[in-house]
Every structure is written in C-alpha cells, then in structure tokens.
Image: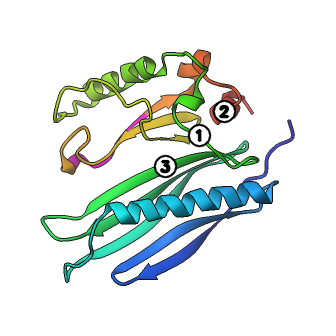
Amino acid sequence: MAPQTPLVVQTAKASFPKADLSIPYISGGTNAQADAKMNQVILESVQQLVNSQGSLEDPRAEMIGYFEVKTNEKDVLSLSLYNYAYTGGAHGMTLQKSLTFRASTGKLYSLSELFKPGSDYVARINAFVVKGIAERNIPTLEPFKSIAPDQPFYVADRSLVIYFGLYELAAYVYGFLYFPISVYALQDIINEEGPLGPMLAND
C-alpha cells in the first residue's frame, strides 16, 4: 500500500459572548468528500460539547475550546476535542470528545468497530484498566466494574488509549484518567480494516 500523506489540520476560530473556540479544520486528503465528512462530524461534536456545558449567564462565566491531534498517519486521524467552561461554583468543568477516522473515507469509528465481530473486547480492555488502577493506586469513587461498550478512546503512539471523564472513575482532582494499551497486546482481536490495523505494521 502506498504511504499515506498526513492530512492538513488547521485551526479555525469561533467566538461568541464569553466563549473562544479553536476548532480543527481538515484538508489535503485524497478524497475531498471524506475531508468534508470529517469536518462536519467535528463541527457537530464541538456544538455538542458547547451545549453540554449549560448556561454562561453567570457574570464570571467563560468557555474555551481547543483540540489535540493524537494520530495523523497511515490513513488514520485521531483527535480529541476539549471544552472548558466555568459556569459558577467551585471550579470549571472540562469535557473531552475524541474522534477517530479513516482519512481516505471519512468514516468515524466506534470502539466496537476496532475489533473483529464477536470478540470480547470489553473483557480484554477491562483487564488492562483493572491492572492500571492497581498499579497506579487510583482511589476510585466506586469499585471498577467495566468500561462501556462505547467507552471514549483515541489512538496514539501505536496504542489504543481508553479514558474516563472527570468524576467518572475518581474524584475531580484526578482529572481525566487514561489507560494506554499497546495494539500488539490486542493483535489477535483487532479488525485489520479498522484504524488499529495499520498501527500493527512495523514501518
């Protein structure tokens, strides 16, 4: 397969009262329709994050949106959108939404689609999360039972990174909790047509 050129990721700005958003804008792919499809999903996701934060009526309220590109190679684009808002109270709240695409088609992947049909990916990932909680001595709010079948994730450094939002697993002070899992540790159940497939190649 010919090497895939990374996409061009630029920053578009959007502002409204008390809010300043930096939004990724995709171009330069092999398929302009795929680029447009990804940009549409990104815009809708940014809007969802804005809506989830609630009202900015408090005189001290503010909102900041930003993003991080996690993977932009091998026909895979994985990025995280963040939205921080202070709407009153003791502290602000940061939300994160991650999106992982096949760059040439613009297809957005869910966690289950990264794996072969019928594979027990939830149990496999749970084992890594349990191990990570123990190794890092994370005081969970409740005993960890299981990830959700559509648990948030992104792809970075040949790893699948599973994460939990603020308050989801531990107290606010612990922030987002990330559990990176090497793609090689999941190799036998990976859907090679999905975004993790290209990460298995040693090139």
CA gap between label 3 and label 2 equals: 16 Å
Mark 2 crowdedness (10 Å alpha carbons): few <14, some 14-19, many ≥20: many
- Residue at the spot 75% in from the left edge and 33% down from the top edge: 203
| Dot 2 or dot 1, earlier in sequence | 1
- Residue 149, percent across and down? 43, 29
| Dot 3 or dot 2, earlier in sequence | 3
**Amino acid beneath label 3:** Ser
The reply to whether discs 1 and 3 touch (Cβ–Cβ < 8 Å) is no
Q: Is residue 15 left or right of residue 102?
A: left
- Residue 186, percent across and down? 55, 21
Assign a secondary structure to mark 3.
strand
178 in magenta: yes
One can see residue 7 in this view = no
- Residue 79, percent across and down? 54, 52
Mark 1 crowdedness (10 Å alpha carbons): few <14, some 14-19, many ≥20: some
Between residue 203 and residue 54, name the one nearer to us: 54
| Dot 1 or dot 3, earlier in sequence | 3
Q: Which residue is mark 1?
A: 109
Q: Is residue 105 left or right of residue 158?
A: right
Q: Which residue is mark 3?
A: 98
157 in magenta: no
- Residue at the spot 57% in from the left edge and 27% down from the top edge: 183
Which image quadrant for residue 195?
top right
Image mark for residue 7 = none
Q: Is residue 11 above or below residue 187?
A: below
**Amino acid beneath label 1:** Tyr
Q: Which residues are magenta?
A: 173-179
Q: Which residue is mark 2?
A: 194
CA gap between label 1 and label 3 equals: 10 Å
**Amino acid beneath label 2:** Gly
